[in-house]
Image (tube, rainbow, N blue to C red):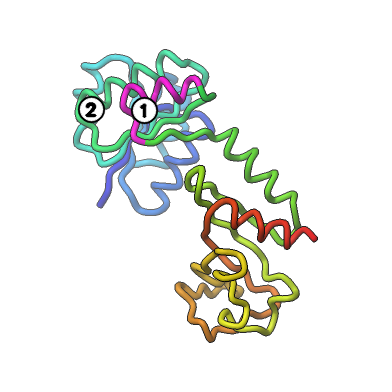
Amino acid sequence: MKQFVVIGCGRFGSSIAMTLNDLGYEVLAIDEDEDKVQEISKHVTYAVQADVTDENVLKELGIRNFDVVIVSIGSNYQASIMATLITKELGANKVIVKAHDALHGKVLSKIGADKIIYPERDMGVRVAHNLVSSNILDFIELSPDYSILEITALEQWENKTLKELRLPNKFGINVMAIKRGEDINISPYADDIIQKGDILIVIGSTKDVEKIEKNAGD
């Protein structure tokens, strides 16, 4: 079973820690604020009050033995950078860090962060895509080049098979799954028929996904 460390238990960090715990994983939550530690302690495996910029403290907590470390420190850039640097130096397998802006992200990248998350920017992108059309339920940018789109079936798609729709040819996107009520059809077949209300999860280049969005917004 994977083990996770969440450093920084603000809203973002707490949300990650509790979700991972609910999914059945072991989670160690660390924060300098005693009140935050007390609050999160009921929702994770372990919760510790500690100075996350102290290398000896993190060493004693056995950071290097965890599969993933998530650094989610508030607005204290220095603490965020120090915690990232120390966890990498201690040999953590994978370090994911919340960045506040591009400059912060660039520094984190240079000191070895394996993945950088921009919660505010990413949420803004998702909200903007959701506003394009009522059919667009969610948008996730995997990288600058590839995205995943969750979209309610367009009217012109209803009662047609995936083969008839030819979405890879027309839009350059592939259907990963179809959600129908509580059922999810993973890797659907070409003969599967799209029904009214179906939700399609599609993947493709960001440019191709945007074509679908324009089509949905018309």
> Looking at the image, is 27 positioned above or below residue 212?
above
- In the image, is 104 to the left or to the right of 135? left
Q: Position of residue 146 (x, y in %)?
A: 50, 51
Residue positioned 55% across, 72% down in the render: 178
Dot 1 alpha-carbon crowd within 10 angstroms: few under 14, some 14 to 19, many 20 or more: many
Q: How many marks?
A: 2
**Which amino acid is tagged 2?**
Leu
Name the quarter where the C terminus is drawn: bottom right
Q: Position of residue 6 (x, y in %)?
A: 37, 34
Could you say which disc has been placed on residue 189 in the image? none
The picture quadrant where one finds residue 47 is: top left
Q: Is residue 46 visible?
A: no
216 and 30: which is toward the camera: 216
145 and 112: which is toward the camera: 145
Residue positioned 38% across, 18% down in the render: 81
Residue positioned 59% across, 33% down in the render: 120
Residue 111 counted in the magenta span: yes
Label 2 secondary element: loop
Which is the main secondary structure of the residues drawn in magenta? helix
Residue 102 counted in the magenta span: no
Identify the magenta region: 103-114
Q: Which residue is mark 2?
A: 61
- In the image, is 212 to the left or to the right of 65? right
> Looking at the image, is 18 positioned above or below residue 72?
below
Q: Which residue is mark 1?
A: 30
Q: Position of residue 207 (x, y in %)?
A: 59, 52
> Looking at the image, is 9 positioned above or below residue 44?
above
Which callout, 1 or 2, points at the residue further toward the start of the chain? 1
Label 1 secondary element: strand
